[in-house]
Image (cartoon, coloured by chain):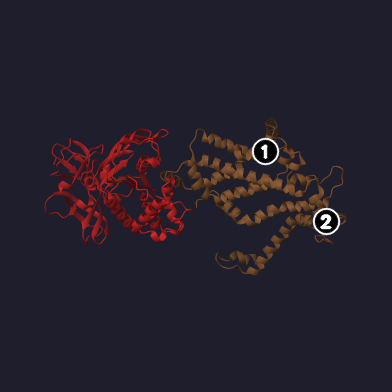
Amino acid sequence: MTTPIRLRNVTKRFGAVEVIRDLDLDIEPGQFTVFVGPSGCGKSTLLRMIAGLETISDGDLLIGGQRMNDTPASKRGIAMVFQSYALYPHMSVRKNLAFGLETMRMSRAEIDRRVNAAAETLQITQLLERRPKALSGGQRQRVAIGRSIVRDPDIFLFDEPLSNLDAELRVQMRVEISKLHERLGNTMIYVTHDQVEAMTMADRIVVLKGGQVMQAGTPLELYNSPANRFVAGFIGSPKMNFLDATASEAGIDVAGQRLDGIAARPAPGRLTFGIRPEHVEIGSGGGGASLGEARVDLVEHLGGTTVLYAVTPSGESLNVVAPGQQGIRTGDVLPLRLDPANAHVFAEDGSALRRSA
Amino acid sequence: MTDAAAQALPGQQPAYPALRSAISHSVLMAVSFVMLYPILWMLAGSLRPADDLFGGNTSLIPSQVTIEAYKDGWFGLQISFGKFFVNSLIIATLATIGNVLAASLAAFAFTRLKFRGRAIWFALMLGTLMLPYHVTLIPQYVLFLKLGWVNTWLPLIVPKYFAVDAFFIFLMVQFFRGIPRELDEAAMMDGCSPWRIYTRIMLPLSLPVLATAAIFSFIWTWEDFFGPLIYISDTGLYTVQLALRSFIDSSGSTNWNALFAMSVLSLIPIFLIFLFFQRLLIEGIATTGMKR
């Protein structure tokens, strides 16, 4: 089942502190939406408000077109997977899965059918009689997901579900959750502070900061045209380089160089110039605009790529991700270039200046 | 030896393990003996003939063993001592159930429910811990007198169902705080009411602390002398502790052997509880307030 979620002017206050302010958001049916942002940005609070675990101070929450502000959590057609899994320690895996269904007073036969089906889907059938403490982290995670599947909810919520797993398991569970979404097709919301998880899993990413939506869009929209400096810095790894720039009638100056071919035509004044490390090219020839020369402070050889930590003549740091293996050493001075199409320009308030395309 | 032991690195055996443990055991046994002597003397006294009891007799071994005192004691008062045991058992059991039930409900409310003035109520509750029993004694007596409950068991039992014992509430609050809140939230998503969260999640996870509270509650009620003394006057309603007191006759002819014999019997339930529940008791105290 696919159900849309709409948030209208939603505000959350804890005492005098506004954690979420006047937030509008549409989550389309069947979409896998990821809320991402630094800690304290309100992403978990927003999820918990949708779940019904936090009250909504102001505004409306619509699920499937109906106002749900005052509907109890269990009546919203939502299942949630918690960061700590929150499995009931005193119950076997089977009881954990069945508990919610028993609370709904479902028939024994139907409960058994659903529990067995979910266990099969998640390959935990052989664990059904065990207690949670006898399970590994990955197995607990599966049980937690199983507990949400058996309820056959309209909407799945995930609150940083992978942050307690080691790196390898995390990648594996990430793929499994994506597959689960593909198979079930439900509306899912996933909260994480890990932008890689966001980029790889999401149909749509919502970047939050200070309780406000910074930008919402597909992963590539966010990567290619970030709406502001915060999103530009948050999405992408390593981070985008930011350099001080000045605009005049004649053009834009960055690191002492006049950059030609940048589409944006800002009003004269100070601004921030952004370029992703993977978009900086090494070499003096070829097309594009020159960034001048930079001294390499540190080289990281990753095999597939080489990461350079460089400093421009104006003393600003500039990171470069060069393809393949490069014979570059610390202390080398390299000419750098870029394709103006990849450049980002941000006004002093941080908002991106649209490239007139 | 102490030096050698002190120098021993962690994980290594101390230099003279046998000697060390022999010394520590003899110290422990000597102290235990001092603690146990009065009880053992009472036990010996209960098995002695009446004329052998006093006269500076400190020996723990009776010259002559007789169970005469147990017979005398059991039937020595107008009512058989069995009746007092039944009375005490009923009161202690009902009081224990009340204490555990009410204290856990109150603790659940303090840790998991939001209500107006929660912090103030909690502080007030803790404040009653510092209130001496004797301060509330007279108002309480007047209250129960007006209710017509004096000379019944009700003053000893009913208050326990209103969570009057702040110690138990605090004990459970500390334990409940250690149970992750996400479990409640998961249960809420599963459609549980607060009552169902309490019965199906909190109580099963709190067995150690519930057992601790139950054991203490039972022992303290069983041992209570003052409460029954104040509220109960009919011999038929006497608890064991009151009945023991009535061996001490105001006319001076106290049957000490019988008193000792019945005192020994009155210790048996508590002794059994310790024996069977010692593990739970230790676990309960050790895990209180700790995350598991």
User: Mark 1 sits on what residue?
Assistant: B154
Q: Amino acid at mark 1?
A: Leu
Up/down of A173 relative to B246, above or below: below
- Rendered hue of chain A is red
Q: Quadrant of residue B272?
A: bottom right
User: Mark 2 sits on what residue?
Assistant: B68
Q: Nearer the viewer, residue B36 or A299?
A: B36
Q: Amino acid at mark 2?
A: Glu
Mark 1 in CB contact with mark 2 (< 8 angstroms): no
Task: Give the SS element for disc 2.
Answer: helix
Q: Quadrant of residue A256?
A: top left
Q: Could you tell me which quadrant the C terminus of chain A lies in?
A: top left
Residue A248's spot in the image, x, y percent? 16, 37
Residue A138's spot in the image, x, y percent? 38, 57
- Rendered hue of chain B is brown
Can residue A238 be seen here? The reply is: no
Going 61% across and 43% down the picture, which residue do you hit?
B99
Q: Horizontally, is A149 left or right of B217 in the view?
A: left
